Image (spheres, grey):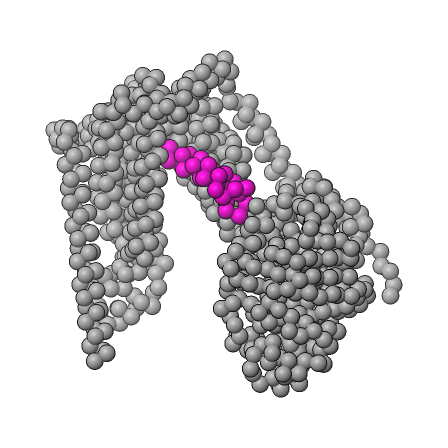
Amino acid sequence: MATQTFQRTWRRRSTRRELALWFGWLLLVALFVFCWQVMTENTIWMFVTDAPRQAADIGSRMFPPRWEYIPALLEPLWDTLNIATLGTLLALFMAVPVAFLAARNTTPSVRFVRPVALLIIVASRSINSLIWALLLVAVIGPGVLAGIVAIAFRSIGFVAKLLYEAIEEIDESQVEAISATGASKAQVMDYAVAPQILPAFAGITVFRWDINIRESTVLGLVGAGGLGLRLQESLNVLAWPQVTVIFILILITVLVSEWVSAKVRHAII
Amino acid sequence: MTAKAHPRTWSRPPLIQRTWLRWSLYGGALIYLALATASVEVNWLRVWEGLDRGLRFVQGFLVPDFTSRWGDILQGMEESLTMTVTATVVGVLISVPIGIGAARNIAPLPIYAVCRAIVALSRSFQEIIVAILFVAMFGFGPFAGFLTLSFATIGFLAKLLAEDIEDIDESQVEAIRATGAGWWQVVAYGIQPQVMPRLIGLSLYRLDINFRESAVIGIVGAGGIGATLNTAMDRYEYDSAAAILILIILIVMAAEYLSGFVRKWVQ
Amino acid sequence: MLRLNDLSKVYATGDRALTDVSLTVEPGQVVGLIGPSGAGKSTLIRCINRLVEPTSGQVFLGDMEITGLGRGALRQARRRIGMIFQEYALVERLTVMENVLSGRLGYVGFWRSFFRKFPPEAVENAFRLLDRVGLSDHVNKRADALSGGQRQRVGIARALEQDPDLLLIDEPTASLDPKTSRQIMRLIVEICDERGLPAIINIHDVALAQQFVQRVIGLQAGRIVFDGRPDALTPDVLTQIYGEEDWSATIRKADEDGDEAEDELGNEGDHHGAASVDRERLAGLT
């Protein structure tokens, strides 16, 4: 008797769940078809069908790469590295206080200060570094400085978010023990909180630096200095052999930075 | 009890034990910083003049102008959102087989190599560079953007999916294999249930990333809200630009909230 | 001398952790505080140095009323109260020496402590204490490289580095094996004896308490139900504190661990207690 009741309930739930699942998938398909239609409304299909020919054309123009162009790229490459590194450093200075204000266990006020810190984080994270660069080039003029500040603004949210999550996960008993010795708030930060989050902090920094190297290679497209500047120039005059060289250089830079960051992170952990 | 003499000073052992290495690292870092900062050319006069524009920008954020470019904004948002959805769906559909192929524990070596190569190719090129190429091939507009985002999604998702599959509990797979199941059945019964929740979570995360990226690739002509933003900036309409940025932030927040909700529901 | 006057604590959740606790600890006296999980042992100890803020009542250390102090004065008072923790609560990524020196934080300014430039007397004292607890060879090791017993020795040295007038000791042996537990308890009792230090030790192991302390206080649901010499702990008294159980083995055999009794008794209360303590700790930081 009891077994029968149990089986009946189980079946009904299963069917309902199944139905809901199928309905969900159906909804997804409908959404996809709708979006596809809206998106392709203005697409000129002639261009799309023509793409393979275009691709072949561009491909043939890209080779052979113009290797003599490399010396002209060394200075922008140096700029690119600086944008990423100095931008990351600048971001750290701003992200650390924001993280402490955003973490539940260190914020001065959960109700007033924390939401502001979280808003800074989400605003910084939502806006891509290229858009930050677009704004900053308009405000402080084209050049490396705009790139550095753009990278910094984008990185604040990223670093602060991961850091405040690390702060919220610290072992509170160590904080309690240091407070019990009569230490001041600043001393508690230094002796109980900082040692616990330092490894996470170092890891986040290197991780973000790696991402920033990638992003800083293209910031020049909007005038914020670095390799992207040469890319923009070459694209404007349709100098495809030069574009190839730049692509290869970007690829090498990205691979090297990824390797470096993996090494450093490995050494920390 | 004899009174033993104890040291009266103590200093923390340094992080890097070897003295020469420590000092050359510090020195190197310092020299690099000096050179790097020195090579940053700043036109302070231009920055000073720009502060006025910066102020107008801040004003734009306080009093954003949604109305005067509303038609353009709507069009841009429509393109961004639709290409985000389509690119995520197509990207996920393509990355599932590639992800399976890139998992060493279930794919034969030749397929593994090909799939890993595709992942590496997709991951090493920035969205914006891919967008430049696609715009050159397919013409301006959201279709090039859709292709860019799909391509980027493959590298992201296939890599994480492959790593997930490589991390799964082998005993469950073995149990299925022991029943005499074929390769497809092993994937369906031994692997799919284990990685499905995370695949959904990652897809939602990628949806969020794709939207943010869709706001950027418009700068090089691949359609979407980025194009509208670029135009607003070119025309010095900072209040309209601020309105667009606020909308982007709001949509990203909403997407994050929603994906958190769905992820909870899936698990 | 420590004096508690009608001390009560009600957590924000409404849980009554302590009700009208009054007691006096004479100089040099080591008091064992026993009771089931959730009886309020931890809360009582933390109310004394106000890691948990008591709801009502007074705490006097000598002539000073701790409960009436402002922030700055409370810090000064905490310097006089050493505390030793259940899970050692060492800062794991700092060296043993830094952990011991952190006992001196209340006496030095921020920048001195930031650059680890403690006064020579403090450093000398830290070396002496590490020698006393038998850790002279581990001065520069990181705390997480030590064994449980060694960590608790560092915890003891940290508390003593404060040069305290009172020791608060919260389940010092809960994470240690029986042999190490006895070594640590012996060390604590010896040190208190050497220095004439009064101490309150929270302890769930009744046999261990009987072996080492001069006075036992039994806490049940936030009230004192027993206060007397360890040999006065009869089965009747234990039943009153912990509830019905066969106590004959516990009282006779010294190496019996109290763990079993612990598990069966009022665990639910403890969960509430722990959650509230956490919230209090967080509040203390902000």
The residue located at (65%, 67%) in the rendering is C202
The residue located at (62%, 79%) in the rendering is C238
Which of C32 and B92 lies nearest the eye of the viewer?
A: C32
Q: Point out the image quarter for the N terminus of chain C.
A: bottom right
Residue B140: which quarter of the image?
top left
C273 with respect to C89 (left or right): left
Q: Please tell me whether residue C58 belongs to the stretch shown in magenta.
A: no
Q: On screen, A206 above or below C205? A: above
The residue located at (74%, 65%) in the rendering is C24
Q: On screen, C264 above or below B54? A: below
- Point out residue B261 in the picture as x, y percentages from the top left corner: 32, 50
Q: Please tell me whether residue A122 belongs to the stretch shown in magenta.
A: yes
Q: On screen, C146 above or below A117? A: below
- Point out residue A116 in the picture as x, y percentages from the top left corner: 46, 36
Residue interval drawn in magenta: A101-128
Residue C172: which quarter of the image?
bottom right
- Point out residue C63 in the picture as x, y percentages from the top left corner: 78, 55
The residue located at (56%, 29%) in the rendering is B33
Which of C261 and C245 lies nearest the eye of the viewer?
A: C245
Which of B16 and C135 lies nearest the eye of the viewer?
A: C135
- Point out residue C207 in the picture as x, y percentages from the top left corner: 66, 78
Residue B143: which quarter of the image?
top left
B251 with respect to C96 (left or right): left
